[in-house]
Structures are given as C-alpha cells and as structure tokens.
Image (cartoon, rainbow, N blue to C red):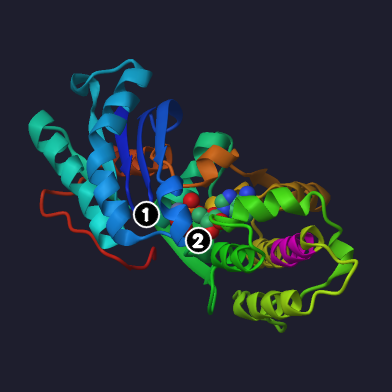
C-alpha cells in the first residue's frame, strides 16, 4: 500500500495535536490545542489534568484537522499515532482514538516513537534533506544526538547524563520568576540582555559527546541568590541561553565531523530557540554543511511530524495491529 493521506495524532504530553499530511511531506493541516494555560499555575505539566483535557479535546481537534485539510474520514489512507515515550495516560487517549478510527475505517494504523517524529519534522521543513545525517533532538525530556542512517536505522551518538536542555531552560526560568514553559520566556528576555555580563559553565569537559545540564542549572540558581547590582535578569537569561546553545552547537558539530556527515538536522521544542537557530545556521555556513531546521511550529510537539514519520512505515507495510501498546519510556534505537 502507498498511503497518500495520513492522519497524525499526538498526545504524548500536554498538547492535543492532529494533522493531515499528504505523501509524508505536504502538510494539509496541523492543529495544536495547547494546554499551557491549564498547567502554567502549577509550574509544569500535571499528568492527570493533561489526560483529562486530551479526552475532551482530541475529537474536536481531529475534526478541525480534517476540515482544515478539506478531507473527510473516507479520504484517510492510514493513521499514525505517538505510542511512546510519554505520559502513559496521555498516550492512551491518542492510541485509543487511533485504534477506533483504524477499526471503523478499515485503514492501517502505525505507532510512532516520539523522537522519531521529531527527526521527521525536518523533512517537512526541508524537503532536500538527505540520508545519512546527524540530528540533534532537544526537548523538555531529551537531549540526544542521533546518526540517522536511513528510515528506521538510528545510532544514538550522545544523550544527556542528567537534565535535558529544555528542562534546564524551564527550571532556570522558574528560578528567575519567568513562569512556565520557561524556554520561550528565556528566549524572549535574552534579547534584551548582554550574554557577556555573566558566563555560566559549559557542561562537562573532555572528549565525550554526552551532555550535562544539572551543573549549569545549579550555577544559575546560586548566581540568582547573589546577583550583583548592574546585572539584570535579562543578562542572566542571555548568559544561560548562550551556555546551553554553545554546548548544543559544538557537540552537534563534533558529532557531524565524527560521522563525516554532510547534513545536520535539529528537532524538538528547544530547536525553536532563536539563538540556537541562528548559531546552527552560522556554524553550518562556515563549515560548508547543509542544515535542516524546522520552523518553530514544527519544532514543538505537533502531529504533522507524527504523520510524516508514520508515512514511510505504512508505505512499507509496517503497520501495527490493534494490540498496539503504549510505553512511558523506551529507546529509539
Ligand atoms: O518537544 P517539546 O514541545 O515537548 C517535549 O517533547 O518535551 O519541547 C518542550 C520544551 C520545553 O522545555 C520548552 O521550554 C522548550 O521546549 N522550548 C524552548 C523554546 N520553545 C520551547 N526552549 C528554548 N527556546 C524556545 N524558544
Ligand atoms: Zn516533543
């Protein structure tokens, strides 16, 4: 089967997402019902609230995605749904809906790994992207460097040994009183700050490509307790962002060099960071590397990337059956 039109469903965390994608590349619709307003007052995602809201929002979100794409259920050739890793209750909502639609339409269903979908967001943003490539995945829960050899063939080159980059943004933003989610707030405030006013540690030294952000988080929290006069919160935000982005950029470049890669790709919520996007562009231009970096709306969680990642599996006949299960954790490779 060559599924042309795939319905993507993503409910792994706190965004209820549905999307219709043609041929794995062309986004016909991409609807994201954000729950940020519900979790903000708790300073982070509350799993129970997230699950209940997914139950309420998923059907209208799917209907909206079909309507915006100008298609009906009958036009859908296959369904792709995130089934791992994530909040188990949240994943169950999406997977149950995917199974029901698959059964009702008699169309194939495929479970997609959340990180694989973040990799595939790059094909939606940059159709020229070629295998093999090195992909940096930076989100609230992951900071991984992956050598993407071909569809389904992934080698993990590095991961974080403690906090994820997004987690570091979020925790430091909280200490700065910037609210949640912290990444976008730091990104915005850092534009008014001077990164040279305060230099934070750049993670672990040595030859390893692995990341470590817990020391940086502690350094920022300690610095805020004794912030000197003349250094603003915006300067701290700029210093923090500079430290995170410098580490992400240099490790990605080293990984690309170690694999002699011609292409670098970036995905996950932190990939929406304006300084990371700028530094990646500059670095790749200087080194003569091609860069795929999705537009911010495709960096953060969305279902278009799930439909794109599901498309190649469905096209190869690698559908899941109705015993498809969810998992809170689980490796990509
Ligand atoms: O991929 P994502 O939407 O959800 C997960 O799979 O985790 O990533 C969410 C993370 C959060 O930590 C959020 O603060 C961060 O991405 N983020 C950003 C920006 N936009 C979202 N971090 C830095 N700069 C941004 N502009
Ligand atoms: Zn994500």
x and y percentages locating residue 322 in the rendered image: 11, 49
- Residue on which disc 2 sits: 140
**Quadrant that contains the C terminus:** bottom left
Q: Which mark is residue 13?
A: 1
Assess mark 2: CB under 8 A from ligand 1? yes
The crowding category of the residue bearing disc 2, from other C-alpha atoms within 10 Å (few below 14, some 14 to 19, many at least 20), is some
The quadrant holding residue 208 is bottom right
Q: Which residues are magenta?
A: 236-246
Relative to 237, 177 lies left or right: left
* Observer able to see residue 266: no
**Looking at the image, residue 49 lies above or below residue 230:** above
The crowding category of the residue bearing disc 1, from other C-alpha atoms within 10 Å (few below 14, some 14 to 19, many at least 20), is many
**Looking at the image, residue 266 lies above or below residue 17:** below
Q: Residue at x 26, y 61 (%)?
A: 88
Q: How many marks?
A: 2
* Residue 119 included in the magenta stretch of the image: no
The quadrant holding residue 138 is bottom right
Q: Residue furthest top?
A: 70
State the CA–CA distance, disc 2 to disc 1.
10 Å
Contact? badges 2 and 1 (CB < 8 Å):
yes
x and y percentages locating residue 268 in the rendered image: 52, 52
N-term-proximal mark, 2 vs 1: 1
Assess mark 1: CB under 8 A from ligand 1? yes
Q: Main secondary structure of the magenta part?
A: helix
């Amino acid at each position: 089967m060559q599924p042309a039109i795939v319905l993507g469903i993503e409910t792994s965390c706190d965004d209820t997402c549905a999307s219709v994608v043609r041929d794995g590349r062309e986004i016909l619709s991409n609807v994201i019902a954000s729950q940020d307003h519900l979790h903000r007052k708790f300073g982070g995602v509350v799993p129970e609230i997230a699950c209940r809201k997914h139950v309420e929002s998923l059907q209208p979100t799917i209907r909206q995605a079909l309507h915006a794409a100008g298609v009906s259920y009958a036009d859908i050739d296959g369904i792709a749904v995130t089934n791992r890793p994530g909040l188990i209750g949240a994943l169950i909502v999406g997977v149950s809906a995917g199974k029901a639609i698959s059964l009702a339409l008699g169309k194939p269903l495929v479970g997609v790994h959340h990180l694989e979908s973040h990799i595939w967001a790059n094909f939606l943003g940059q159709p020229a992207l070629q295998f093999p490539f090195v992909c940096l995945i930076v989100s609230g829960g992951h900071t991984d460097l992956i050598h993407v050899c071909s569809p389904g063939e992934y080698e993990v080159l590095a991961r974080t040994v403690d906090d994820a980059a997004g987690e570091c943004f979020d925790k430091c933003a909280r200490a700065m009183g910037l609210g949640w989610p912290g990444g976008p707030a730091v990104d915005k405030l850092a534009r008014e700050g001077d990164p040279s006013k305060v230099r934070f540690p750049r993670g672990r030294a040595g030859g390893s490509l692995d990341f470590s952000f817990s020391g940086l988080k502690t350094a920022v929290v300690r610095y805020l307790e004794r912030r000197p006069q003349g250094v603003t919160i915006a300067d701290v935000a700029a210093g923090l962002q500079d430290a995170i982005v410098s580490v992400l950029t240099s490790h990605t470049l080293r990984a690309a060099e170690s694999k002699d890669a011609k292409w670098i790709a970036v995905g996950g919520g932190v990939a929406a960071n304006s300084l990371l996007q700028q530094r990646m562009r500059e670095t790749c231009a200087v080194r003569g590397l091609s860069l795929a970096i999705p537009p911010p709306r495709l960096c953060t969680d969305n279902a278009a990337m799930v439909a794109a990642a599901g498309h190649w599996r469905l096209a190869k006949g690698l559908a899941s059956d109705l015993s498809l299960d969810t998992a809170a954790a689980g490796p990509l490779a």
